[in-house]
Each structure stands twice: as C-alpha cells, then as structure tokens.
Amino acid sequence: MMIENEFLTALNPSQRDAVEYCDGPELVIAGAGSGKTRVLTYKIAYLLSQGYQPWSILALTFTNRAADEMKERIAKIVGREQASRLNMGTFHSVFSRILRIESDIIGYHSNFTIYDETDSRSLLKAIIKELGLDDKIYKPGSVHARISMAKNKLILAQQYAANRTLIERDRDARMPEISRIFSIYEQRCLQANAMDFDDLLVITYRLFAEHPDICTKYATRFQYVLVDEYQDTNYVQQCIVFQLTQANRRVCVVGDDAQSIYGFRGANIDNILEYNKIYPDSKLFKLEQNYRSTQRIVQAANSLIKHNERQIPKDVFSENDTGEKLLLKPLYSDKEEAAVVCKDIMRIRRQDRCAYSDFAILYRTNSQSRSFEEELLKYNIPYRIYGGMSFYQRKEIKDIIAYFRLIVNHDDEEAFKRIINYPTRGIGNITLQKVIAASQQSGVSLWTAITQPNACGLELSRSVFTKLEAFSQMIERFTSKLNTVDAMMLGEEIVKESGISADIYASKDTENLSKQENLTEFFNGLQEFVEGNREEGLEERVYLPDFLQTVALYQDKETEDGSKVNLMTVHAAKGLEFPTVFIVGLEENIFPSPMSTNSLRELEEERRLLYVAITRAEKRCILTCAKNRWRYGKLETDVPSRFLRDIDPRFIVIDEGMGRISEAPRRVVPQRQIEPIEKPRSAYTPSFRPVRTVQQPVEHTQPMAHNLQVGSRIEHQRFGVGVVQKIEGEGENTKATVEFANTGTKLLLLKFARYKVL
C-alpha cells in the first residue's frame, strides 16, 4: 500500500479537499473531464487509510464497467486484497445480494430469478393475451415502460390503480387496462419467485421501510456510502441511499448536474439540485479543472450551459492549450453535410497523422446515422456504430427491405420467412414449417409452394389457405407496379398496406419513437434516391429494383478489425472522449428534439445534452447544420438550432467558405454573431403520411436554363454551391455538368434540378 501522503499528492487542491472531508454528507460537483473517477478512487483509499474496513464501505455505480475500473484503480493504491473486499457494484447487483440474504422476510426464496427486459415483456405479452386485449395497442414494450416508470417513482400496482392522473393518462392513450395488467404482473412475478430489475430497487426500499431493524443492520454495516453519477439516480435510488445514511450521515455523492441527460429513463435531476434539502448539513465541493479539453472548448461549453436556469453554478476551466475555437459549418443539405464530414476526417487524419478511432460523429437520434454511413462507405472510411446497429441492420429497416426483396424476387426464401407473418396475420410457425417441408419435398421455392399448393402437396386448413392467398395477392399487386410506380411511391404504399406503419405508429414509447424516426429517415433516403436519379437524368432508374441494387451496397458493411470512426448518439457518448468530435444536425426540430420544446425542464435537458457533446472533444469540435433535409417525402428548409445562439461568439467561428467552389479562397471569419434563430415549427407527426401523388419537379423553365453558361455559379438545394462546367442538349433534355465544392461533379437534368443562379 502506498503511504498516505504519496497518493494524496497526486490530487489537485479541490480534489484533495473533497477526498479528505469525512465529517458529514458531501456533494462533489465534478465538471466534465475534472477527474471524477480519480476522486472516488482516492476517497475510498483515503477512508481505508483512516481505519475504515473494506467491507464497511459501500460504493454504488451505474455500470459494472465503472465498478471494475474503480476497483482496479483502488487495487493499485491499497493492494488487490483490500480492494477485493470492498462492497462495490451497481445498485442492482448490490441490492440483489441483500435481497437474497433477507428473502424469507420479503416472501421470496433466496434462489429467486431476476427477469431481464425480455423476460418481463414475454410475461406481459402472455398476460395481455390472456385478458383478450389487442396487442397492437397494448404492446408489451409500451406496457413495460409505463410499469417501470411507475416503479421508479415507488408507485406499485395498488397505488397505480388509485392514481386518477395515471388512469386518465392511460385512457387517453387507449390503454385503460394498464393498472389491471400491472396488478396481475406483480402477482405473477411473486408466484414465479422472480423479480424484474425495478423490483430489485423497489423491494429493497420496502424491506428497509417496513423492517427498520433490517435497515439499521445495513446502515450500521455500511459505515460510509459513496454514489457515482448521482445526477442519473431516480427517485427510488435516492430514497434507498437516504435510508442507509440518514442516521450516520456519512455519505459522499459525486456527479454533475450539467450532465444530467437521462430524464427519459426516470433520472431525476432534483436529486442533485436539491441535495442540500435532503441533507441540510451537507458540504459542497466543486471540481472545476477540466483535464480533457482545450481552453476554448471548455469556454464554449460553459457559455452554452450558463443559459440553463436550474443548475449549480460552477466555473469549469482548463489549463491545456488554448486550442481552436468551435467551428460551425452551415451546409446546404444533409447530403453535403455528410460529404463535408468525410472530407474533414480525411484531411485531419493526413494533417495530424492520427487514427480513424480519434474521430467521433455525434447525432441527436439514431436515425441520423444513415446519410453518414452511406457517405463513409463511398469514401471507403471504416466506421462502427457505438452502442447500436448500422442503419440498414435495424429490425424495422430489414423488415421493409425484406418486403421489397420478395416483391422483386418471389423466390427469395429468407425474405419470405421474415415477412410471412409480419405484421401478424395469423400465419404461425407450424404453418411455415409445413410450407418449408412441402417446398423441399417438391424442390420448389416457398412462394411456389403457397401459390401452387396442390401441385406441391401442401395440406392446410381452408382458413390458413385464405390467409396465404391474401398475402400472395398483396405481394403480386405490388409486383405489378414495379416498373410503373417509382420506388418512393410504391414503398409508401407497401409500408401502409402491409400494416408496417400501423404497427410502428401504434405506440409512442421510447422504442417505437426510435422506430418511427428510422422509418421516416428510410423514406427520406428513398425519396433522395428517386429525386437524385431524376435530377441526374436517370429517369429509368427510379424503381424498386434499382433501389435494392443500391441499398445492397450499404448492407453487410462489416470491415476488418482495427481503427474505425465512431458514430453514436450523444447519449451513448457520455463518459467518452475523442480528439476530434463532429456534432451534426444542429437544427431546430432535431436538436433540440421537437418533443422537448414545450417544456422548460425538457429543453434544459436538451441543452445539457449539447453540453455533454461538446465536452467529449479534446482538441477539435466541429458543428454542422443543414439548410435542407428530406422529411416525410419532401425537401424542407431548416433553421439553425437555438442552442448555437447560446454559445458565446468569442469561442465559435462560422466557416463561410462552405459551399464555395474549391478554387475560390476559403476564409473563416472570426467572432461573427450567429443569426437570430427563427421560431421552430413542429415537424413531428404522430402517424405515417398517406400515400402521395407524384411530386412535381421544381419549375426551372427553359429561359432560366438559357441563363446558364459555362462558368455560371449555382446554388443547389442538396449539392451546395458549384460551377457549371458544361451544358448539353436542348429543351427538356438540357443537361449541365456542375462541379460542386463538397459533393463532387454532377450531371443535372435541368427540368428536375433544384437550383438558383448566383
């Protein structure tokens, strides 16, 4: 074990003050990159040096990785033997051990099962079926989310049924039977000697509340309690911590209110903001030196977060290099945005001789990854989706692609198996196995087996044949339109008539909202494909088979192991750091989320989310926003995010060279004020858009086309600013070859092109 003074000298004065204080409740506000884990680690080592026994210290974290990392660091200071005897782990792991010890008191056996989310949903699905409820309305995921959120607020089934507000909310959502499902679910878990993850906390709280002697037993055993990431605790977690510490008052919580971004999961920022009300005798410590980022990145982040009304004031600073200012790149479209990010990655990589893994592209929602994935593949830049799946590997996208594949190729066996009963149409696995057996015996495709059942010896009931016939007729209807209706219009028709859109839009829970965003983004890409080919004079290549050929290049994109660009949501980036960070899609209706703009509390969480994004950057932080994006099948004009206006102009510059042709000198204008942000308009729609009529091309009539000449500069809605290199053809067939600054050379059919002459 290191001698005491040796390990304490590794701390700065603020960190050391927080470590050495042991006289009562303590709140340590740890700014981004300020050494939060080091303080927790050294605090535990210091407690051991002051005579506390390892088993008397309880340290609660949110992830096993955080607990393991802390234990490893502590072992280097005090030795592995002492570190191994600490009570350290996640809330759930620590309290599950206590519940097994005290199981007889709470009516469980010590070998109780812990249900994961899949188990919980499976049980709920069974209950919904038993009650004869519509599983398209009572989706197990949605029901589970409501029950989980209630439990996190210590509302059990009985209290739920008596809560008029919750009952009315469920009625408004057309789910009035939630409280009944909740009650049965609670009973069935007990009967099965099982607890879900929420129960591990709720039942621990009830154990301590209903059996004060048990609470005293553990409060005495855990002489010092420490909590990591306190800003992410929910109501029940905070209550349990208070139960264990209200008597001895030896508690230290560490967190940062400016990084509280998990409200949608039940995290309650009031726990940290009102800590001094929970513990009136508490002492506040602030860790304000950022060791991660350059001075200007830290200053920019500070200037942003100061606009939040509810916060604990702090002045985070850095003594690292001054560094570059944040760079804002306003672009013409999401297509140009993706191209510019790819070019910047290649440029900076050559300039700094760094690895691809030194770059991160952060976005507000998972659906935004599509345009970047497609562009990275074009530039042959390896990438990985951190904490998620590639856009075209997501279930709802693979389902739609499977429909497209079967419509184009009836003999596609994997596509057939994937969609034959999605959405549910009463064709179960037993039927599918019979179809497979008949096709193998006859040596024909699954499609042939269901369309020629007699020839293939397929024997099924009349009702099942009726369902298979309806399915095949639907597919045939779509197939008959393959070469006459463009991919966008036919795609919309398929998704609507098959029931996919109704299934995805049946609920507004977090999981379904993500699917809805992905569905919308998929059609944005589909419309971009159609309009792009039309603009480039490829009118014969706007159909579904053509789209499938293109999208095949985006699937199975796995690259060899090694250095890769990191793509992730800002939520997934929490706790990570990268030399260069791109924060993309900084527009109203994206960042902040349109669902947050009517609530100050939610809007402030969105601002904290951007603060987290900026503070992931070590050396460089590049922001992008696009003027035009495809949404719901049409190109919409966006305005920059209101949060850009919050950043002090001393710490951000706008690259006004974006969109200029490559030969033109590019300049970065310092200290320019961000333009006023227009009032946002709502772009969120709760249901899938109906099938549209064909969108008419933008009217660029021949007189306008005749104004073009070689050397003319144009501004295109998707490709940005470019210079005309060549004009050919006449009348409706007039084409222009244009070199665009960021998106390369394009051949445009002028009757469809969306541009204006500069």
Image: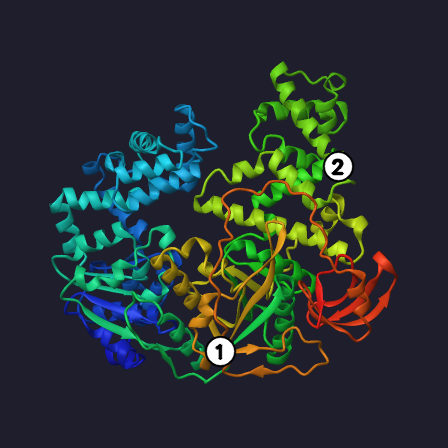
Q: Mark 2 or mark 1: which comes first in sequence?
A: 2
Q: Could you say which disc has been placed on residue 470 in the image?
A: none
| Contact check, label 2 and label 1, Cβ < 8 Å | no
Does 526 appear above or below 103?
below
Number of numbered discs visible in the structure rendering: 2
Q: Position of residue 208 (x, y in %)?
A: 17, 46
Task: Please state if 259 lies on the left or on the right of 682 as rendered.
Answer: left
Q: Which of 497/423 is in front?
A: 497
Say which amino acid is labelled 2: Lys
The secondary structure type at the circle numbered 1 is: loop
Can residue 78 be seen in the rendering of this structure? no
Q: Residues within 10 Å of mark 2 (few under 14, many from 20)?
A: some
Q: Which residue is mark 2?
A: 481
Q: Position of residue 363 (x, y in %)?
A: 52, 61
Q: Which residue is mark 1?
A: 673
Does 243 appear above or below 47?
above
Q: Residue at x 18, y 59 (%)?
A: 278
Q: Position of residue 289 (x, y in %)?
A: 35, 78
